[in-house]
Structures are given as structure tokens and as C-alpha cells.
Image: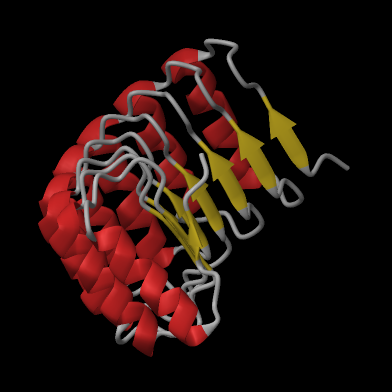
């Protein structure tokens, strides 16, 4: 019985994705599918998303580096409105942009099974981060969110910090290599005083100036070593 399928870096293209999508319509045991760096594009993402409307066993889908774009992210977001099995979705380096992030954020308002979402290196911008922040106010299942290299800016950091005042389930928030600014860092520091569920806040190379002192002060006051400064 096959439960894991990995074709990482094999350049299967959209055609290969279509074949695998067809298999997902019928396969009752596959739980992990890794298609990283396979050039499946938006079309491949769309057919896989369609399969997720019906599949009830796949729990992990890794599509890293496939240039699925905003359209592919939109299709996957639509699938998340219906799918009740997927718990991990990895979309690192897929050029989904702000629009794709907003679509996925909207899905998080309804989805009740996704626990890990990786959107690293997707240039989601401040707008994408704000949409995800709004989603975190309502979502009760997501435990890990990776927005590294996302160009979220100070405004995006502030929106996510505000969400942490309300969210009680997120445990890991990765904001590495983002220019969060002093204001963003201070907003996160305030949030950490109220949020006791977040276990790891990754902040390597985030350009926060004096905001670092505010974060260090909170950790000293609360005795919680939450911030991870290492790469």
C-alpha cells in the first residue's frame, strides 16, 4: 500500500500533474504527495486542486517551486473550502503574490483541518499579510505559518501582531528576512504579552532596529524564550 509519493525535481510538468490528479480521484491510501520543483505551473495546480475537492486521504501536499502563480493559489484556496483531509500545504517559491495570499487567507476563514501553511518566498506583500492576519482572528486550527522572505513590511507585521491578540492556536510564526521595522517589532512585543500559545517567532534578518530591545524585554518579563533569532 503506497502512502507517500515523491517526484521532487523530476520536471513532470502539467501533464504529470494531471496524471497524479487523476490518481488522487481514486487513490484511497496516499497521504503525502511531494511534487517540489516539477514545473507543473498554474495548470498543474488547478487539476490537483480539483482532485482535492474529492480526495479524503491526502494530508500533506508539497508544491514548492512550481510557478503556480496567483491562479494556482486561487484554485487551491477554493479546494480548501471543501477539503477536510489536508493538514499541510507547502507553497514556497511559487510566485503567488498578494492576490494568491488573499485567496488562501479567505479559505482559512472556513477551513478547519489545515495546521501548517508555508508561503515562504512568495512576495505576498503587506496586503497579503494583512489578509492572513484577519484570517488568524477566526481560524482555530492553523498551528504553523511561514511567511519568510515575504516583503510584508511594517504594516504586515502590525496586522499579524494584532491577530495574535485574538488567535489561540498558532504555535509557530516564521517572519524571517522581512523588513518589519521598529513599529512592527514593538507591535509583536505587545502581542506576546497577551498571547501565551505562540511557541516560536522566527525573526532572523528582519531589520527592526530598537524593536529588538522591546522583544527582549518581553521575553525577560514573561520568562518565555519565544523569539528565534537564528537562521
For the rendered model, the colour scheme is secondary structure
Q: Is residue 108 above or below residue 91?
A: below
Is 85 in front, or is 121? 121
- Residue 60 shown left or right of residue 208 in the figure: right
Residue 67 x/y as whole percent:
33, 24
Q: How many marks?
A: 0
Q: Is residue 187 above or below residue 124?
A: below
Q: Residue furthest top?
A: 11
Quadrant of image for the N terminus = top right
Q: Is residue 26 above or below residue 83?
A: above
Q: Is residue 9 above or below residue 54?
A: above
Task: Kindly identify the residue that appears in the image at 16 percent across and 45 percent down.
Answer: 125
Task: Kindly identify the residue that appears in the image at 45 percent across and 85 percent down.
Answer: 221
Q: Residue furthest right?
A: 1
Q: Quadrant of residue 55?
A: bottom right
Is residue 227 visible in the rendered image? The answer is yes
- Residue 54 shown left or right of residue 95 in the figure: right
- Residue 208 shown left or right of residue 76 in the figure: left
Is 173 in front, or is 115? 173
Residue 65 x/y as whole percent:
43, 24
Task: Kindly identify the residue that appears in the image at 53 percent across and 18 percent down.
Answer: 16
Is residue 108 visible in the rendered image? The answer is no
Residue 144 x/y as whole percent:
50, 61
Q: Quadrant of residue 217?
A: bottom left
Residue 170 x/y as whole percent:
46, 73
Amino acid at each position: 500500500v503506497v502512502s507517500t509519493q515523491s517526484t521532487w525535481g523530476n520536471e513532470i510538468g502539467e501533464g504529470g500533474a494531471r496524471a497524479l490528479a487523476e490518481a488522487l480521484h481514486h487513490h484511497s491510501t496516499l497521504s503525502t504527495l511531494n511534487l517540489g520543483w516539477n514545473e507543473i505551473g498554474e495548470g498543474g495546480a488547478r487539476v490537483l486542486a480539483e482532485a482535492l475537492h474529492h480526495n479524503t486521504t491526502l494530508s500533506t501536499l508539497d508544491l514548492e517551486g512550481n510557478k503556480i502563480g496567483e491562479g494556482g493559489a486561487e484554485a487551491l484556496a477554493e479546494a480548501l473550502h471543501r477539503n477536510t483531509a489536508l493538514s499541510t500545504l507547502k507553497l514556497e517559491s511559487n510566485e503567488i503574490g498578494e492576490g494568491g495570499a488573499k485567496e488562501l487567507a479567505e479559505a482559512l476563514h472556513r477551513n478547519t483541518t489545515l495546521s501548517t501553511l508555508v508561503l515562504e518566498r512568495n512576495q505576498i506583500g503587506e496586503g497579503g499579510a494583512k489578509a492572513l492576519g484577519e484570517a488568524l482572528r477566526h481560524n482555530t486550527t492553523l498551528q504553523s505559518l511561514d511567511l519568510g522572505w515575504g516583503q510584508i513590511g511594517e504594516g504586515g507585521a502590525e496586522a499579524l501582531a494584532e491577530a495574535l491578540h485574538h488567535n489561540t492556536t498558532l504555535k509557530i510564526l516564521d517572519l524571517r528576512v522581512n523588513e518589519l521595522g521598529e513599529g512592527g517589532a514593538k507591535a509583536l512585543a505587545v502581542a506576546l504579552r497577551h498571547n501565551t500559545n505562540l511557541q516560536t517567532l522566527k525573526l532572523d534578518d528582519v531589520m527592526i532596529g530598537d524593536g529588538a530591545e522591546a522583544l527582549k524585554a518581553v521575553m525577560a518579563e514573561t520568562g518565555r524564550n519565544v523569539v528565534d533569532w537564528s537562521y
